[in-house]
Image (cartoon, rainbow, N blue to C red):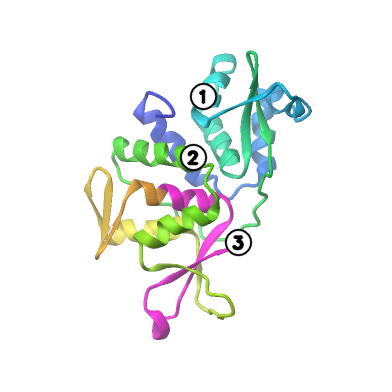
Amino acid sequence: MVLREKDANAQILRNFIDFSFKPNQYFLTNLSRVIADSLDQLECTGQALRKVDTKEGVELLRRKSKLSNLEIAYILLLISRGYRFRVITERVFLCEEKALFPNFESFPPLKPKISDDFETKTAVLDVMVESQYKDDDELLSNITKSIPELLEKSYGVHYSGRYLSINEWLQIKENEGEWISEDTLRCNNIYIAPKIIANLLILQARGWYLQEILEKFKGDDYILLKK
């Protein structure tokens, strides 16, 4: 787990979802108030730096700074977009490495709850942290294999349906379906596991969204798109 307390993990996930559409500079500006030294990009060029994963990086930062759950969510959003933890001796840095700067569409402020269960929220967050280093193609492959109505865009095909955020799509599925166990959302004949929700939320943080395929063509299918 990111943190030992499941309620704290649930709050981190909530903040990740709520702030997915903010630009990198928003997170960096707010984080600079508490971990300014760890955002020094000049230090990131040192040859002696070693890589550490997200969980270890967060834990090292928490030893030197009092990070709130909101600030941890900001860090996870930056990690999803290409920032990485690097360490030398006892010093930890959050370094920009091929970072993404997504251009977001304007969407209604609709957000999924991701269940009422802290175990489910923690499961989603854990998978998210494990999957942050995967590229878009691998995440897309996981999603499209599990959810037939979510499709990759076909080259040369023009679509004219409405646009939705991934948040909005997840909220629709929660409203139409039910959590049949602590880790599975069932909507009609679709079963959505924490791994797929986590993959979708990572893509959303990277600027992905959905376009509905008009009913006369494909019913309720959606194309996954990125600006």
Q: Disc 3 versus disc 1: distance between alpha carbons?
A: 33 Å
Q: Disc 3 versus disc 2: distance between alpha carbons?
A: 19 Å
- Across and down, in percent, residue 33 comes to 67, 25
User: Residue at horizontal 69%, vertical 28%?
Assistant: 32
> Quarter of the image holding residue 71?
top right
- Across and down, in percent, residue 180 comes to 20, 50
Q: N-terminal of the two: label 1 or label 2?
A: 2
Which of these two is toward me, 211 or 156? Answer: 156
Neighbours of disc 3 within 10 Å: few (<14), some (14-19), many (20+): some
User: Residue at horizontal 35%, vertical 29%?
Assistant: 6
- Across and down, in percent, residue 34 comes to 64, 23
Residue found at the very far front of the displayed protein: 47
Which of these two is toward me, 91 or 22? Answer: 91
What kind of element bears circle 1? Answer: helix
> Quarter of the image holding residue 45?
top right
Q: N-terminal of the two: label 3 or label 2?
A: 2
Question: Is residue 109 in sight in this rendering?
Answer: no
Residue contact at pointers 1 and 2, CB within 8 angstroms: no
Residue 210 included in the magenta stretch of the image: yes
Which of these two is toward me, 220 or 33? Answer: 220
Residue 43 included in the magenta stretch of the image: no
| First to last magenta residue range | 198-227
Q: Disc 1 versus disc 2: distance between alpha carbons?
A: 20 Å
User: Residue at horizontal 48%, vertical 46%?
Assistant: 17
What kind of element bears circle 2? Answer: helix
Q: Amino acid at mark 1?
A: Glu
Name the residue that disc number 3 marks: 105
Question: Which mark, by number, is residue 56?
Answer: 1
Q: Amino acid at mark 3?
A: Glu
What kind of element bears circle 3? Answer: loop
